[in-house]
Image: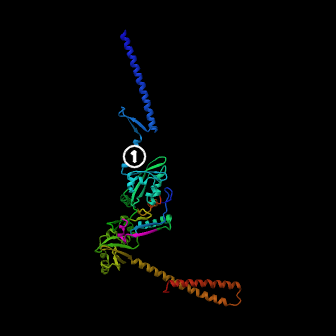
Amino acid sequence: MSTRKNGTPHNPDKWELRLYTAGQTPKSLAAIKNLKKVCEEHFAGRYEIEIIDLLKNPRLAKDDQIVAIPTLVRKLPEPVRKIIGDLSDTERTLIGLQLRPQS
Amino acid sequence: MNQAIDILQNQAIDTLQIENQIESLRQQLQEAEELRHAISHGEVDAFVVGRTDDTKRVLMLSGAYARYRQLVEEMQQGAVTVSRSGEIMFANQAFAAMLGLAPIDIFRVPLARYLAFSDAGDAAVLLQPHPGKAEVRATLRAPNGRQRPVRIAFISASDEFNTLLVTERDERDEEAGATVDAIRTGSVDALVVGGEQVVMLDSAQRFYQAAVDRMQQGVVIVGPQATVAYANQRMATLLGMPRERLVGTSLLKLARNGDEAKLATVLLSHHGASAQAEVQLRRANNEYVSTLVTVTAIADSQKMCLVSDLSLQKRHEATDERTRKFLGTMAHEFRNILGPIRNAVEVLKVRPGLDDECRTLVDVVERQSARLIALVDDLRRVNPKE
């Protein structure tokens, strides 16, 4: 169990993230940029980002039941969580990743 | 006389009885007030109820709690009371069932043990004496491995314990809500339909359209008969006509007579790769503009044509040519002037009796003229024809 104090961010050893994009759409590009920024700021050196371009492999959408693009899926730490959108709302992204408690 | 005395005596008795009754009522009222005070201050924990000795019984106030407890036990939502350190002090049947356990099994077990790792910290907030937030989303993790998304809400706190309400939540509903929000706020620009087909949303198309509209090349999308379905602003400017007039007309009809077949070959061919043709297109003022048309198939029988203005390119080429000629002429003229200067310096250097100051000045002229010659040579290289 995490030893963090109440409401403070917890930091597992490994973050495994999967970002579903649709080629080079503006929102997909924005999501990649925003995700990398959050990762570097909060768990540099402890994350893996897998970018899945659904324009090239639309069938991969089924794996995580993706409906809207871009969508970020947090595979690790468990439980699996989805954040839909371009991650431009940093506060919402941090809450979605559970780096910040939900208000 | 006797009758009058009787009446007075009776009235005196009535008055005494009334006074006694009033006093009795006053005492009952006082008792009732004391009872109310005792109940409201938690000073009694049982009542004697029933009118007769046979029906009288003691009603424990804990009996009222028992009823609440029964209600909590039977309700469908999970209820759990935890200590400040996070141990489960009470859990109802519904909460225990979410974990696949009996309530007794989880007594004094830390609540965090049944939460997904990353949720434990958020839920810990609910254990504080005055939680700032009323609810957290979490995932319950049963010992058998089953995970269950829940909402945990703070209900009440006592000195040592907090009671929480645990409700199952439907992640699919939540995701659907989040998707609708994301589309509404424009933070997604594509959707997956039918499980494996990606459809761009209008906002994305608008972005591409805006980018294409601002391109310096003409862009035309044509249908099966080379009919224009879309033209960007640059194309409209190139042909000197509004876009509305272009849409619906055949691009072939805009080609100069001799070029029509050439354009048709690249537009109507079924080659996957792109094809190019140099064609002259008729402008609105009936003049012709030389273009290079590059055709690429983009979708079912649709093709995209990139149209470059060759006349502009030719104008640029002509400008470049004039510049090169000017630079060449300049280089030639400079060299003509520099030749005699270099010769004069050579003569001066070998002249006897030159004092040191003059020799220094000659050196300066020689050095600077050498630099000037190097610059002129650079200019000549710009124009190889020179």
Toward the left, the furthest residue is B225
- Tag 1: amino acid: Arg
Residue A11 on the magenta segment: no
Residue B53 occupies quadrant:
top left
Compared to residue B155, the image places residue B262 above or below, namely below
Q: How many marks?
A: 1
Front-lying residue, B308 or B318: B308
Compared to residue A94, the image places residue B31 above or below, namely above
Residue B348 occupies quadrant:
bottom right
Where is residue A101 shown, x and y percent of the image?
A: 46, 57
Residue at numbered disc 1 = B69
Where is residue B203 shown, x and y percent of the image?
A: 37, 64
Front-lying residue, B222 or A3: A3
Residue A58 on the magenta segment: yes
- Quarter of the image with the C terminus of chain A is bottom left
For disc 1, the neighbor class at 10 Å (few under 14, some 14 to 19, many from 20) is few
Where is residue B327 shown, x and y percent of the image?
A: 51, 82
Front-lying residue, A45 or B348: A45
Compared to residue B365, the image places residue B195 above or below, namely above
Left of B34 or right of it: where is B230? left
Residue B316 occupies quadrant:
bottom left
User: What stretch of residues is rendered in magenta?
Assistant: A48-65
Query: Can residue B284 be seen from the camera position used here?
Result: no
